[in-house]
Amino acid sequence: MRPVSLMHIVTAALLSIFSILTGCSSEDKATSVFVQNLENASGALKAGQELRMDVVNKGEWNRMFVFSPYTPLSEIETAIKLKVSSAIESARLNERDDINLLVFLNGDTMQLVAAVPRKIADFSVARNAQPLNRNSAVFKKMGPDGMLVLENSK
């Protein structure tokens, strides 16, 4: 058996402490998985193909919203008819142009909030966000590097 150096022990202890202090919540993990799934799905699409959000997010949700860059928190709150969560606030959508914010609800409960970098998936949606039910959350890729446009918005 090889002796373990003090440096290895200290490094392992510091990594453990750091992991505990900055550990991801289950919500953060679910969001990361969703964004990765969305990146894989949208990256695999060819122009004209559809992306069904119920396939990307198989969790429990019955409606979703897509908020475009610079949307004020007050507009998000009005649209979802709930107080904004810390996840929505921390996205700072009202100050940014590099993300879209996707909010999934099941009834009056927020199930998932994802700040999606526009380089992963860029959505073209109406400025006045409307709820999309699970069956109608279908987007079409408009070009090789194109935006995802709501299917029934043509």
Image: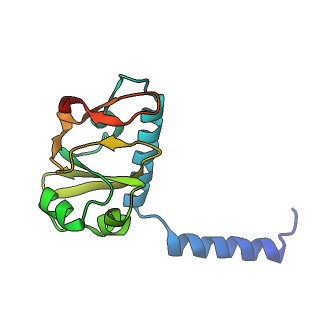
- Coloration mode: rainbow
Examine the image and state in which quarter residue 55 appears: top left
Foreground residue among 115 and 57: 115
Of 73 and 143, nearer the camera is 143
The spot of residue 41 in percent (x, y) is 43, 33
Front one among 77 and 34: 77
Residue 18, horizontal then vertical, whole percent: 59, 74
Compared across the picture, whether 64 is left or right of 123 comes to left
| Residue in view at x 74 percent, y 77 percent | 10
Up/down of 64 relative to 113, above or below: above
Residue lying farthest to the right in this orientation: 2
Q: Is residue 105 above or below residue 134?
A: below
Residue 84 appears anywhere in the view: no
In the image, what residue occupies the spot 44% across and 52% down? Answer: 32
Q: Is residue 123 left or right of residue 152?
A: right
Query: Quadrant where the N terminus lies?
Result: bottom right
**Image quadrant containing the C terminus:** top left
Horizontally, is 8 left or right of 22 in the view? Answer: right
Please identify the quarter of the rendering in which residue 76 is found.
bottom left
State the image coordinates of residue 28 (x, y, percent, origin top left): 41, 59
Q: How many marks?
A: 0
Q: At 18% across and 62% down in the image, what residue appears? A: 75
- 12 or 117, which is in the foreground? 117
Can residue 143 be spotted in the picture? Answer: yes
Residue in the picture at 17% in, 42% down = 132
